[in-house]
Image (cartoon, rainbow, N blue to C red):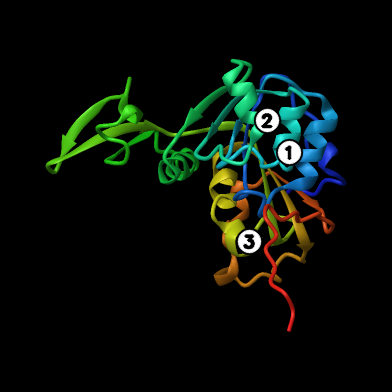
Amino acid sequence: MPSKLFSSAAAALHDLRDGASIAVGGFGLCGNPEACIAAIAASGARGLTIVSNNCGNQGMGLAVLLKQRQVAKVVGSYVGGNPDLEQQMLAGEVAVELNPQGTLAERMRAGGAGIAAFYTPTGAGTVVEEGKDVREIGGVRCVLEAAIRTDFAIVRAAKGDAFGNLRFYRTAQNFNPLAAMAGKVTIAEVDELVPIGALDPDDVHLPGIFVQRVIHAPIHADVIEFRTTRPGP
């Protein structure tokens, strides 16, 4: 079996091109694949479509790509705390497609599971249903949502092996596994690279069949969106 291990994020993203679509794991700034985001920023690739819960916050995370004018479209569920996206969206420089958060998660999961589309009651009777097929199922008004498949996916795991079996850390499990499933080429950066077999099968959150490339990235900034402290005793 060919090795999935790459020496760096830049090497793993060697075939990134202008206009590519990328699913990105993370929840806010938690669990961001920081090494891969930095490599994309350094690549200079432009016209990118980013599929992520949010496209960074306060100039950090994916917002770095917005600052460098590398993003053409964002498919997400949250834009708060992101002045870069707000400004570019209002100026017509970046297209934004907002999804209910659970719908976005399921669209990515469906893409990885080979499900072309699904019906959901979420968003029925609102602007979310505009332009989509709507029907009543079991007496409930439902909206047809298409699955998401992207050219690439970049995710971050707390532990992983060379085959790409991954274990995520707490809140980072919210979107990272789903983003990984959506990508045609998925790149996982792992905090701790362990030998194959070291992860108990019951502890694997995402099997390596969904991962094509693995890099060891032990150092992260792990920035905090809003640091809240209380006075000491």
Q: Residue at x 63, y 61 (%)?
A: 168
Residue at the bottom extreme of this rendering: 233
Q: Is residue 95 visible?
A: yes
Total number of numbered labels? 3
Q: CA distance from mark 3 to mark 1?
A: 25 Å
From the viewer's perspective, is the residue at label 3 or at label 1 nearer?
Answer: 1
Mark 1: which secondary structure? Answer: loop
Tell me, yes or no, if residue 2 can be seen here. Answer: no
Q: Is residue 43 left or right of residue 187?
A: right
Q: Which residue is mark 2?
A: 84
* Label 2 – label 1 distance at C-alpha: 7 Å
| 78 and 168: which is toward the camera | 78
Please give the name of the residue rendered at 70% of the width and 60% of the height, measured from the top-left corner. Answer: 227
Relative vertical location of residue 123 with respect to residue 92 in this rendering, above or below: below
Q: What secondary structure is found at the residue carrying circle 2?
A: helix
Give how far across and how far down residue 172 sits, in percent: 61, 57
- Between disc 3 and disc 2, whose residue precedes? 2
Q: Give whichever of discs 2 and 1 has the lower sequence position.
A: 1
Q: Nearer the viewer, residue 15 or 173?
A: 173
Q: Residue at x 74, y 31 (%)?
A: 65
Q: Which residue is under mark 3?
A: 168
| Residue type at numbered disc 3 | Phe
Q: Earlier in the sequence, mark 3 or mark 1?
A: 1
The residue singled out by tag 1 in the image is 59
**Do the CB atoms of the residues marked 2 and 1 lie less than 8 Å apart?**
yes
